[in-house]
Image (tube, rainbow, N blue to C red):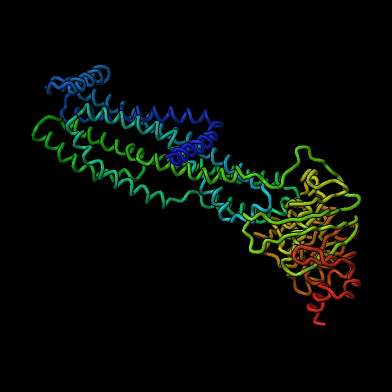
Amino acid sequence: MGNTKNKEKSKVKIYVRIVKYVFPYWKHLISSMLFAILYSVFSGISIYLVIPLLETLFSGKTTIELLHTGGDSFFIEKIKLSLNYLVSTFIFTGNPMESLLRICIVVVIGFLLRNLTSYFQAYTMAYVEQGLMMDIRNDLFKHIHNLSIGYFTNERTGNLISRVTNDVSVVNSGVSASFVTLVKEPFSALIYLSIAIAISWRLTIISFLAFPVALIIISWIGLKLHKESRILQEKMADITSFLQETIFGEKIVKAFNMEEFENNRFKIETKKYFNTILRMTRIRNLSTPVTEFVSIAAAAIIIWYGGTQVIIDKTLTPGEFLGFFLVVFQIMTPIKELTTVTNRIQEATAAGKRIFEILDTEPNVKNDPNPIKIESFEKEIVFQNVSFKYDESENLINNITLKNINLSVKKGEILAIVGPSGAGKSTLVDLIPRFYDPNEGEILLDGINLKKIELKSLRGLIGIVTQETILFNDTIKNNIAYGLSDISIDKVIEAAKAANAHNFIMQTPDGYDTIVGERGLKLSGGERQRISIARALLKNPPIMIFDEATSALDSESEILVQEAIERLMFKRTSFVIAHRLSTIRNASRIIVLEKGQIVQIGTHEELILQDGLYKKLYEMQFKL
């Protein structure tokens, strides 16, 4: 019992958090609710005014004349006659033709006001709904950039995209149910029900016996139509693709301090989706839902019983019967909508829980409360008794650990890192830009603990070239100049030449304006790698990290890339991870890792003379 209460309280808290996103759009929300009430009122008036119109047509008399034809003495009948008298006295006077003209004009005005209020209600609510979705998605995207790299190890990209796209849409549906459906539909149902009882309380009771079957049919068709509907697939596909691409390249985004830049790009995409869906909503809500057609099935019983009252019992006039039929036809829609409210709110709460799980996740790596900004790297990077183990929740097959790493790298030194797969090479260099923080010990940059340094300024000093090159679906120029604003094309070309990339770029269809495709797949591996090196050269950082930058290349590409890497390492402090030992012979020092520990350290010439792991790896690679 206690667990059930706690779950319900949790759901309420989640829903309250969702509702807070509505507050910035409170003016549109209030307008939508007022239009919803006006729509219900004008709907009832419009339907009720059809009755005197039909009576005038069928009998050739005015409504005032018809009031004196009789009727039973039930209380409800007296109220009905009084309402008819009031309407007829103020609107329908004169001969039948004059009455007919006035009735037609008033009916047209009534339905016009009904449709106008329906349109404005739908549009103002769409503004609230789409604004809410835009804000939640922007908050999610911004928070994703703040999360640590370790978070993405444990989370599937598709799952994150689903939460930002599908779950947000489900949340929107629940908000609409709370603020519009619960206001508009009960009010409409009450008005229609009052009119139906005023016309014939007997026929109203019979009609409600037929409702359950009709509602089941209408709800089933509504669900089918909802599943088949497709809204702006192209725009949503753009957002999904952008998300997948950026999450895939999160390490590069962080390394180049481009979180804010990517946030702004994402806001542009969501704003496009917001504007487009509003245009579509304006068009879509001008038409009547096709599901109303199914209500005819439920009306068959009503027609039969009502017909007996008109033809045999004479308790209803033809005009009243047809007016009743129209009212019942209308009352089924709000009742059907109300039956879905609870489910929609429950679904929204469940989706909201998934969304807030992301928003409530705190990054493992974050700025110190009083971070130190640094402008340059002057002396050395020191690892002091550093140990690291991935969080068990990251579910890694091989939970790589670093054990008691002690290392000092002077400015301008080239440090090569080698060892078998799983030794911890990438883990070691990932600690430098603080993609992760050590569990024990500390890393110092010019004597300052990395945890004390502002993340943005730290990563501004570091360039990264990885084996899996990250390029974005943009031009070659923008990929090279990533993270740099107002950079001249001359500097971009200079960097490309230094990276041995200029020649192949000029052979592409649009040169530096060529779109490289998603993840740069329009280019070869060697070409992508040289673009990545040009990007690092243009950033011109004092510290470089090369994580197996040439391991996936063919011999020709490797030579070109290696030349570019050597230019990039010139006068820079470099950390080089390489499986191909031939590429690191000129390193200042080489450290050999095995099972997360440094087992050897020295130059190539020194290590090859030792009977250790380095010599074994070298002999295996060159088959000596």
- Residue at horizontal 90 percent and vertical 64 percent from the top: 588
- Residue lying at the far bottom in this picture: please name it: 624
Q: Check the image and report above or below for 461 versus 28.
A: below
Q: Position of residue 162 (x, y in %)?
A: 54, 51
Query: Residue 596 or 80: which is nearer the viewer?
Result: 596
Residue 102 showing in the rendered view: yes
In which quadrant is the C terminus drawn? Answer: bottom right
Total numbered labels placed on residues in the image: 0
Query: Residue 550 or 224: which is nearer the viewer?
Result: 550
In the rendered view, does 105 fall on the left or right side of 425?
Answer: left
In the rendered view, does 106 fall on the left or right side of 581?
Answer: left
In which quadrant is the N terminus drawn? Answer: top left
- Residue at horizontal 73 percent and vertical 48 percent from the top: 258
In the rendered view, does 69 fall on the left or right side of 234?
Answer: left
Q: Position of residue 567 (x, y in %)?
A: 87, 62
Q: Position of residue 246 (x, y in %)?
A: 65, 53
- Residue at horizontal 55 percent and vertical 35 percent from the top: 21
Q: Check the image and report above or below for 552 versus 472.
A: below
Occupied quadrant, residue 373: top right
Q: Position of residue 320 (x, y in %)?
A: 19, 30
Occupied quadrant, residue 535: bottom right
Q: Check the image and report above or below for 398 versus 188.
A: below
Query: Residue 516 or 526: which is nearer the viewer?
Result: 526
Residue 93 showing in the rendered view: no
- Residue lying at the far left in this picture: please name it: 312
In the rendered view, does 255 fall on the left or right side of 184?
Answer: right
